[in-house]
Every structure is written in C-alpha cells, then in structure tokens.
Amino acid sequence: MKVLTTLAFSLAASSSAFAGLITVDYQATNSGYSSIAGSFSGTDTNNDGWLTFNELDNWNTNYGGGAGFADLNDLGDFDYTNNIWTPNAFQWDQVTEDAYMTWNNWSYSTSTSNYNWMFDTAVENIAAVPEPGSLALLGLGIVGLGLARRSKKAA
C-alpha cells in the first residue's frame, strides 16, 4: 500500500504539459507598405510551452503569391501560452537571426531589422490531450478501490 501511495504522489507531482495540436493565425504589416497573413500549426513535442520550427506540421502565407509548408525555411519560436512570437529565425541572408519567418528558398523574410514587421497573432485549436500521468493516476485509483474491496471481503 505504501508503494501505491508513493507512486500516486509522484504521478500527481509530475508536470502537466500540453500535448495537442496548436494552430496560430497571423497577420502583419511592415510600416504600412505590405501586408501578410497566414497560419502555422504543430505539436509541442517537448512540452516546454513553445512551438518551434522543428515541431511544425503545417504553415502557409498569402505573401509573394502564396506559399506552403514545403517552402518554409525557418520560423521564429512561438510562446503559445502567452501569445508571443519571437523573431529569432534566420532572415534571407541566412546569417542574421531577427526574422519571424523565411521562405521560398530564403527569398522572402519578415525581419525586424530590414522592414520592421509588426505581427498580430491568434492561437486557436488547442485541444487538450490527457497526459499519461493522469491516466496512470486514474488507473491507480481503480486498482486501489479494487484492493480495498478485496480486503473487506477477506475480513
């Protein structure tokens, strides 16, 4: 019984993280000269609260005739819990890391130094997925109830 109690407390203390699909819609302007809109989505595989380039499943934009996920070269990290997009992607020169995103074989870039892009973002489709720890806790509770009932019958 002590083992079950210890296991239950350790599972309850484990971090609860988000494991579902995250979709972000964006639109932006660069000092009023151009506008851009699109979306990107992915899963926070390391459960750190950030959606990064390597965690993306989809991306699109309407800028420059439009582009899709296969055209994306780099994307800045996105803090989906606070709705903050960090411009730390490589821009078109592949040296400076101050872009929100770069695409079409490094031809297009939304950098903060060259064109001062300003973005508005909206996080959508955050579908909660039960954590394995939560499911294990539920299972432990059911096992505990069964053991308690069994010990009552034996007495």
Image (tube, helix red, strand yellow):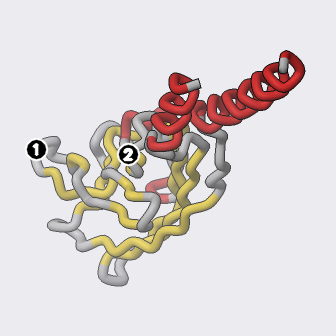
Q: Nearer the viewer, residue 17 or 117?
A: 17
Position of 125 with respect to 98 (left or right) is right
Residue 95: mark in rendering: 1
Q: What residue does disc 2 label?
A: 48
Crowd class of label 1 (few under 14; some 14 to 19; many from 20; radius 10 Å): few
Q: Is residue 67 above or below residue 71?
A: below
Question: Which quadrant: the N terminus?
Answer: top right
Tell which tag, 2 or 1, sits nearer the viewer.
2
CA gap between label 2 and label 1 equals 26 Å
- At a point 34% along the width and 75% down the height, the residue shown is 118
What secondary structure is marked by label 2? Answer: loop
- Give how far across and how far down residue 141 sits, in percent: 71, 34
Contact (Cβ within 8 Å) of mark 2 with mark 1? no
Q: Is residue 5 above or below residue 79?
A: above
Q: Quadrant of residue 144?
A: top right
Kindly identify the residue that appears in the image at 50 percent across and 46 percent down.
Answer: 16
Looking at the image, the residue that sits furthest to the right is 153
User: What residue is shown at x 23% (from left), y 70% (from top)?
Assistant: 115
The quarter in which the C terminus is drawn is top right
- Is any part of residue 68 visible from this angle? no
Label 2: how many Cα within 10 Å (few below 14, some 14–19, many 20+): few
